[in-house]
Every structure is written in structure tokens, then in C-alpha cells.
Image: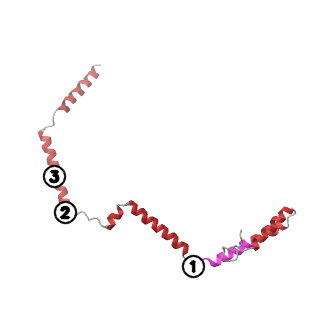
Amino acid sequence: MAELNAVWRGLAALQADADAAPAHSAKVRFQEMVAAYQAGMAAAQPGVRQVPRPGRAAWFTGQPVWQFAAAAGLLLGGILFGRYLPPSPAAGNTEMTLLRAQVENLRQTVALSMLQQQSPSARMRGVTYSEKIAQPDRNCSTPCSRW
């Protein structure tokens, strides 16, 4: 108990010291330190720094609405440009032709295997499938099937 009372008396003495006003010399030292800091900052920046005038670029970067509108316009322009740009004839023409031929051969093989089934319904599906293969798609520029 005696040690705890000593701690409480020490805390009370600290509180009394904290309530006292700081010494005048501490205030003078603080003001000297601030003055030295300001002098150092002035020496580090020899010229007067001019604030740049806001131009068109500064106005644009400060307006997120215009940034969004510009991004949307560029996206729309890219989509329209890509949509109506004719495809280059040399880019993958031979590969596409080979792939289309392989797909057509696979479809014919599937139709023949369906026609050879013993079930009448499977043979009818094969007939229907082979009719769809024979009818070209209207949207294709090259002969291709609907499936």
C-alpha cells in the first residue's frame, strides 16, 4: 500500500507541473527553431515558384465528366471503326478455308452415321440433318451450313 501511495503522490506532482505555464526561454527557443526552418526552406528554393496557369489540359484533367465522355467516345469510335472496316484478305484465309472444309466433312460423316442407324427416328434425324447441310446460310459470304 505504501508503494502505491508513493506512485499516486508522484502522479499528483506531475499534474501540478503540467498545469504550470511553460518557461519563457522555451517559447523563445521554439520561435528561433521556426525561423531557422523558414530560412532553410527559403534557401532551398532560390527562385519564386510560379503557379502554372490553368489551361485546357489542366481543365480537362480536373473534370472527370469530360474524361468519361472522351473515353466513351473513343470506345464507340473504335467499335464503329472495327465493325465497318473490311477484313484484310490475306489474314487467315487459307486456315479458315481448311477449317470450313473439315467442319463440312465432319457434318457429312455425322449425317451418314445417323442414316445408317437401325432406329427409324435416328434415320429421320439424319435425313433432316442432311437437308440442313445442303441448304446454305444466307448470311455467309462463302458456302456454309446453318449448323
The CA span between labels 2 and 3 is: 19 Å
Position in image of residue 135 (x %, y %): 74, 73
- x and y, in percent, of residue 99 in the image: 68, 73
- Marks 1 and 2 sit apart, C-alpha to C-alpha, by 58 Å
Q: Does residue 95 appear left or right of residue 127 in this picture?
A: left
Label located before the other in sequence (2 or 3): 3
Give the class, few, some or many, for how many residues have Cα within 10 Å of label 1's Cα (few <14, many ≥20): few
| Quarter in which the N terminus is drawn | top left
- The residue at 71%/75% (across/down) is 101
Disc nearest the viewer among 1 and 2: 1
Q: Quadrant of the C terminus?
A: bottom right
Among the 4 quarters of the image, the one containing residue 90: bottom right
Using the rendered view, name the quadrant where residue 94 is placed: bottom right
**Rendered location of residue 133, percent (x, y):** 75, 71
Closer to the camera: disc 2 or disc 3? Answer: 2
Tag in front: 1 or 3 = 1
Q: Which mark is residue 48?
A: 2
Q: Residue furthest front?
A: 138
The magenta stretch is 91-105
Distance (Cα) linking label 1 and label 3: 71 Å
Residue on which the image places disc 1: 88
Q: Give left or right: position of 141 versus 6.
A: right
Membership of 82 in magenta stretch: no
- The amino acid marked with disc number 1 is Ser
Residue 110 visible in this rendered orientation of the protein? no
Q: Secondary structure at mark 3?
A: helix
Depth check, front residue: 8 or 80 = 80
Q: Is residue 138 visible?
A: yes
| Structure colour scheme | secondary structure
Q: Name the residue tied to disc 3.
A: 36
**Helix, strand or loop at disc 1?**
loop
Q: Amino acid at mark 3?
A: Ala
